[in-house]
Amino acid sequence: MGRFDNRIVLITGAARGQGAEEARRWVDDGGFVFIADVDDGAGQALAAMLGANAEYLHLDVSNEDGWAAAMTAIESRGPLSGLVNNAAIYQPQPLEQTSVESFDRHMQINLRGSFLGMKHGAHAMTRAGGGSIVNISSTAGLRASPGSFAYSATKWGLRGMTLSAAASLAAHGIRVNAVYPGPIDTDMLKVRSADQLAERVKRVPLGRMGTAGEVAAMVLFLLSDDSSYMTGAEITVDGGVTL
């Protein structure tokens, strides 16, 4: 038997990177995953690879009607027990170079998307009698990140939303926790040059970048019954960057 037998999770931004690794591990541990993304080709390919315990949903996380439709599709299969708000964009620019368009796009996807996920996920989990929400933040939401102004703003905002949601949803049996990854070796960081990434690694006490699997392991722990007395937790997976 797996930890997640007969359980359903929705993971946003799950076609690639950390989200895809979380989806793979969830299915390997017995659960059913809804892979939500806007990259239809990659998302459908992952769902096909994972087999009968995976389904792809096209979801623009900034669109509330899309969230409502997603919950209808999920609940037609069974109660939602887990949600991972993983979808995000990362376009690093300092304050003075950040355009209004870039700032707004970060807010729409990274912050509004997680808000809508928690809102609609909470309704579904309340109907199910409880559940677990995991928000993927960043160390940019714990300390100054002058080179990624808009991204950092969304991750600080997500920190506040996580704590507020944890306090308000506990009475419904819904736990809300956040994971704060440091530099992780995924496609998201390819916007940085090799030299820039090398400089970042020099600032990591453990001396290397993290892997998607290391983040996924923490996410699945927070989705599981092993973390049943945890809510409002802020967990870094950062190689010691925030020490």
Image: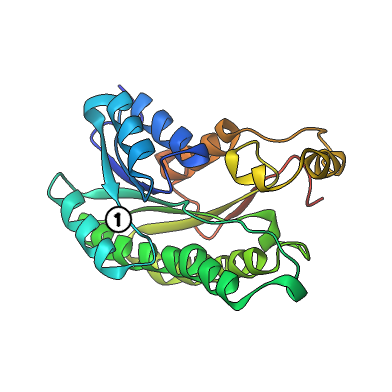
Q: Is residue 55 above or below residue 233?
A: above
Q: Is residue 99 left or right of residue 177?
A: right
Display colour scheme: rainbow
Image quarter of residue 7: top left
Q: Would you call the spot at circle 1 few (<14 residues within 10 Å), some (14-19), or many (20 or more)?
A: many
Whether residue 124 is situated above or below residue 209 in the rendered picture: below
Percent x, y for residue 140? 69, 59
Taking the view exactly as shown, the residue that stands out farthest to the bottom is 100
Pointer 1: what residue? 130
Front-lying residue, 84 or 41: 41
Q: Describe residue 5's horizontal placement relative to residue 241 as left or right.
A: left
Q: Residue at x 69, y 46 (%)?
A: 182
Quadrant hosting residue 146: bottom right
- Closest to the observer: 145 or 240? 145
Residue 234 is drawn in which quadrant?
bottom right
* In this rendering, position of residue 118 left or right of residue 153: left
- Dot 1 amino acid type: Gly
Residue 67 placed where, x, y %?
Answer: 28, 62
Image coords of residue 21 (percent x, y): 47, 33
Looking at the rendered structure, the secondary structure element under dot 1 is loop
Decide which of 46, 217 is in the foreground and name it.
46
Instruction: State the residue at coordinates (30%, 32%).
Output: 47
The mark tally for this picture is 1
Identify the residue at horizontal 53%, vertical 60% (top origin): 232
Residue 79 at what x, y percent from top left?
Answer: 20, 49
The answer to whether any part of residue 163 appears in the image is: no
Residue at x 34% of width, y 59% of height: 173
Q: Which quadrant: the N terminus?
A: top left
> Could you tell me if residue 139 is visible in this image?
yes
